[in-house]
Image (cartoon, rainbow, N blue to C red):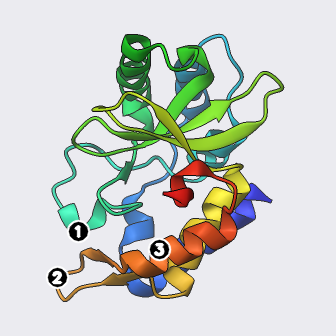
Amino acid sequence: MLADRFQQLLSLAQEQRPDYPASLGSPPESGQELLRKAAGEGEIPDLLSTLYRQVSGTRRSIPEQHLMDFLPGYRLIHITELLQETQRARETLLEEGDCPPARVIPFLANYSGDFYCVVLDDTGAEKICVLTNLEGELEEWSASPAEFLETVSAFYREGAFTVDADGFLEVDFDKVDEIGQRINPDSPYWMD
């Protein structure tokens, strides 16, 4: 189910950004081992397993900046950089004591040290949270990976994401808020 939702998202992105899905590359043979290292002693979240079985992600140093954005300003962390970015996110959490860091694995990052993370609860259920470097707190964005992928797909489908003449992702913030609130009505991020 998650794999189908991710493929749908990539198809919607490709309609406006034809080169974007291919820019994410194919997963390396060592992909599952890299995921295990990032997860440490914990389980590999379903969302990360789904994403990195299909693509390898976007390198921090991507030269074609118009192909960076998975979400505006955030790249899908390249699988070879996942362990390093996971350590950075966990250091931010340790400084604030907000959550057991081992239960948090980032998958989207910006250049300011902010992340979108999968957070596992005690039952192994996954939710998607935003971790900002300045605040050092996790804020729930979606209650599940399926809702996360559906929200991003709806941004494309309903015109909240468009592409400018230079190929960069543009955002209609009013539409983003309306869609986000509709699909994620109980997530604190969308209540502000």
Q: Classify 161 as above or below 4.
A: below
Q: Is residue 79 visible?
A: yes
Dividing the image into 4 quarters, which one contains the N terminus?
Answer: bottom right
What residue is shown with label 2?
Answer: 166
Give the residue displayed 40% in from the left and 61% down from the top: 71
Judge from the rendering whether residue 167 lies leftward or rightward of residue 172; answer left or right.
left
Q: Nearer the viewer, residue 30 or 52?
A: 52
The 10 Å Cα crowd at callout 1, few under 14, some 14 to 19, many 20 or more, is some
Point out the residue furthest to the right here: 123
Please report the residue visible at 57 percent of the width from the left and 68 percent of the height from the top.
180
Q: Any mark on residue 66, and which?
A: 1
Looking at the image, do the residues carrying marks 3 and 2 touch, with CB atoms under 8 Å apart?
no
- Where residue 183 sits: x, y (%)? 67, 68
**Percent from the top left, x then y, of residue 114?**
33, 39
Q: 49 above or below 86?
A: below
Q: Residue furthest front?
A: 192
How many numbered marks have been drawn onto this rendered protein structure?
Answer: 3
Query: At x 54% / y 87%, what residue is drawn?
Result: 158
- Name the foreground residue: 51 vs 70: 70
Q: As shown in the figure, which amino acid type bears the numbered disc 2? A: Asp
Q: Secondary structure at mark 3?
A: helix
Above or below — where is 49 with respect to 169? above
Query: Mark 3 or 1, which is nearer the eye?
Result: 3
Q: Secondary structure at mark 2?
A: loop
Which of disc 2 and disc 3 is earlier in sequence?
2
Amino acid carrying mark 3 in the image: Val
Q: Which residue is mark 3?
A: 176
Q: Nearer the viewer, residue 12 or 184?
A: 184
Q: Mark 1 and mark 2: span between their CA atoms?
A: 8 Å
